[in-house]
Image (tube, rainbow, N blue to C red):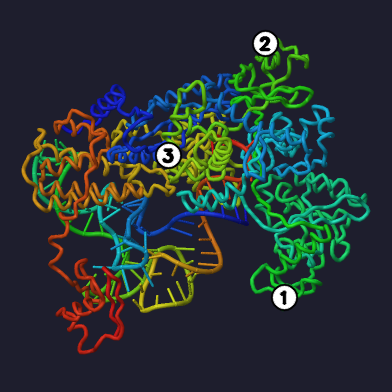
Amino acid sequence: MGYDFKEIENKWQAYWADQQTFKVSNHSEKPKFYILDMFPYPSGAGLHVGHPLGYIASDIYARFKRHKGFNVLHPQGYDSFGLPAEQYAIQTGQHPAKTTQDNISRYRTQLDQMGFSFDWSREVRTSSPDFYKWTQWIFLLLFDHYYCKDTDKALSITSLINRFEKEGNVNINAVCDVKIEPFSAAEWLAYEDSQQQEILLGYRLTYLSDAEVNWCAELGTVLANDEIINGVSERGGYPVTKKKMKQWSMRISAYSERLLSGLEHLDWPESLKEMQRNWIGKSIGAKVFFEIEGSDKKIEVFTTRPDTIFGVTFMTLAPELDLVQEIVQPNQKKAVDSYIKETQQRTQRERMADVKNITGVFTGAYAVHPLTGDKIPIWIGDYVLADYGTGAVMAVPCGDQRDYDFAKHFDIPITNIFKDVSVAEEAHTDKVNTIIAHSDFLNGLSYKEAMVRAIDVLEEKAAGVGTINYKLRDAVFSRQRYWGEPIPIYYKNGMPQALTLEDLPLNLPDVENYLPTPEGAPPLGNAVNWAWNEKERRIEANTAIDHTTIFPLELNTMPGWAGSSWYFYRYMDAQNPDVFVGDEAKNYWQDVDLYLGGSEHATGHLLYSRFWQKFLFDLDLLPVEEYAKKLINQGMILGTSAFVYRKPGTQTYVSKDLLSPEITCEPIRVDVSLVNASDELDVEGLKKWQPQFAEAEFEYSKGILKVGREVEKMSKSKYNVVNPDEICEQYGADTLRMYEMFLGPLEQAKPWNTAGMSGVHNFLRKFWKLFHQEDTFLVTDTVPDKKALKILHETIKKVTEDIESFSFNTCVSSFMICVNELTSMDCHSLEVLKPLTILLSPFAPHISEELWQKLGHTESIVEAPFPVFDESFLVEEEKNYPVSFNGKMRFTLSLSLALDKEAIQEAVLGYPRTQEYLEGKSPKKWIIVPNKIINIVF
RNA sequence: GCCUUGGUGGCGGAAUUGGUAGACGCGCUGGAUUCAAAAUCCAGUUCUUUCGGGAGUGUGGGUUCGAUUCCCACCCAAGGUACCA
């Protein structure tokens, strides 16, 4: 009777499901603990070995917390809207709902076979109408609120309208980024409805505006930067240009300051908080207004260095700014237009990455320096980004390196405004120990003094104003996609009208075709009945839109991050049909105690969800302002992608070792399952894998085609996904769980690699053998010897500490050492084996349950109290060597002796071998580290 | 480019946070057991060496009695970079 993991694992998985062992109640005497995983997108490639890493870690912690007496909420669900299902639908015509359901079923099977302790009765799916009803509802709430700076929270649009009706907009202090002329109460009331709506859109927390997108005319769709490679679409290789389109956006910028300051009290990784801080990008400076010669327009710039205002020698505008067209002089028009066209073909990332290539064009226009009245040439340059600050900079080449490089490149004069500093070679960017010179009233001031003074004077002359700028941009919320939440909006007289909660969910309509319409409208434009009957408050099957009772519905859908911004509250009360989460549930669970997920979400999901949380908190809909007290980033398990090399313009693929620097071959990804451990490609398999390879030619090296390797994110599109199924089949879930933990530190990224699996599997077999002798179950009542108890308690201590600090890899090592020692002692004592079983149960739950039952327990091991470390088993023997000498004038003292300096010196000098080394000399200096090492300097 | 993280034997990694670098596991080598193999057990395993020792934690500097750990500069890899999730 060996360790039959298959039988054991099937048995206990069935038992847990049958007994509903992990179903958790919203009432309990015990303290609550909510452990959340970032839910997966159910990809067609199935769950890969990277997913379980975090789930195993959270499951270990969840089981540990149950042993420690907590009422643990540990749910799971699916982030099931997304692009891959839609692209699959485009290729095959398969409805994304069907694909998604299939993928979810597969995921569930895979998750179940790993023995996770999820409470599946609380499962959520973002693509289910029961769920997205509430996502749509939150959208409506955002639409129905604005951000009031006086109270520093979101307030209802109705209250804003009331104020407009009473006092106009003069005293309103709210976040609004469109220019709205002052109006009185009477004027407001006289406005037409559409005019009022237009104004209100400037305030709403979700609003329509023109946003720049990557437009691909051939595909008739908008593309992510991700989908653009070298300026052409990844799919098809068509040209992509920048285009302005009406888009829904979320006014996350209103929450910039609170998102920033809220980080302070969160127990999240410092690096991740730093990423969010940098992303929000708070900077203090000033807006400065420059008049334009021969125009009544002004250029508004944001600068963090108003102290250098006298060093301005030119200005640079982002090429895509509308203003450029208005000021460009006829003799420069041609050059400017061709430059703009050029930059339109580059993504923002390319522009930022390419700093060595300095490009720009003079517009022919001049601005007027607000303080000196000097003529300042206005340039455009792609190092200035349209969506940061105002899209325009006042260039101070002596104080900013990019401005300096630009000036040098185009031979623009550089004025030095720093005292005793040379700017002949590079800009002087140091702010400390700097004295301003050649700057009129700023002469002799330090950076700090000059900042304040410059802003004062600019404000006096109405030429500027002190400002805080945030890099954080409003989040575009429209997607020209099918497989997402429909936006609950219809259009009346061209203005957006909100549905109400009673109208929801607004179900996603069926379409024949998942591509954009021939006219370039989003896929929902293909739906035959996508119109709203305003009177009867329902979707209208009759497509005749008459704009009196039947109105067109919004065709865009929501982005992937919509549902994931609030899903963690739905788990608390997943079945509630009346509210997004019931009061009782949310008051009991409050928030997430531990959130586990990857740092790749740092500036996406983890920021958006904090924004929604704060908004819902403002509305008194949620009890806390931050939803996750503690966050741990599990490192990504990376895949090892394989590449074949195609000779340019041919269908010939070359073995990697034949590549020479002269021919630049194109690397093309191939599926890793076609490659063996020695990087040799299965060419016949490749030919069958994708039609493009069926007729290809291959250049072998010694009959072998070697592939190139690269470590990168595991993803279906990179063909480098490894499934956990085979490992479960071969070694069992307990081995997989322990192995993934043993692989390395939880937080660190590491490439997947199966070498070493057998070591962990062996450990479990040895553990099993501790309970058996000659294949019969044997656990004795004999009193264990002291050594066995010592090793047990060392292990309890180490494992408890390691679980609490999420060092699961070293935990596994401790188990191995413990079991090896007990094996060599031939220890079968119940007093040792019982606590050890509980200790192991979070890591290897199946084998622990089995042995627990064999020990005579009828209840599951799940709730057994965790063993407690007892120090008294450890100290005894260690008192024998108070001082040890390692021959290099270095001493180690045991705990009991390391008290104070004098006692230590006395002990060391009294030690016989000390005298040998001293040879009559006396120590000059003692270096004593308590409980550690002593060095003596002669 | 910018932000974040990491770089230690043939491999994954450990090091009480400034104190004997390489725990534990894989792999490899030798041995025991076996007709044989698998499995299991025991021993060895950073490199180098004239067997005294010498070198060694991405590279080059620095601080320190002492640095994988702290500081400066650089190189390499991964994640993010706003429509992948």
For label 3, the residue is A50
Instruction: Bin the neighbour count of mark 2 within 10 Å (Cα to Cα): few under 14, some 14-19, many 20 and up.
Output: few
Position of B8 relative to A510 (above/below): below
For label 1, the residue is A422
Instruction: Bin the neighbour count of mark 3 within 10 Å (Cα to Cα): few under 14, some 14-19, many 20 and up.
Output: many
Residue closest to the eye, A63 or A718: A63
Image quadrant where one finds the C terminus of chain A? bottom left
What x and y, as percent, mark residue A146? 67, 37
Q: Determine whether label 2 and label 3 are within 8 Å by CB.
A: no
Give me the C-alpha separation between circle 3 and circle 1.
Answer: 54 Å
Q: Residue at x 21, y 83 (%)?
A: A917
Q: Nearer the viewer, mark 3 or mark 1?
A: 1
Q: Which of marks 2 and 3 is in front?
A: 2
Which sits earlier in the primary sequence, circle 3 or circle 1? 3
Label 2 amino acid? Ala
Label 3 amino acid? Gly
Label 1 amino acid? Ser
Q: Which residue is drawn at 39% across and 47% down?
A: A746
Residue occupying the far top of the picture: A542
Badge 1: chain ID: A
Residue closest to the eye, A211 or B40: A211
Say yes or no: labels 2 and 1 on the same chain: yes
Give me the C-alpha separation between circle 2 and circle 1.
Answer: 74 Å
Residue closest to the eye, A891 or A152: A152
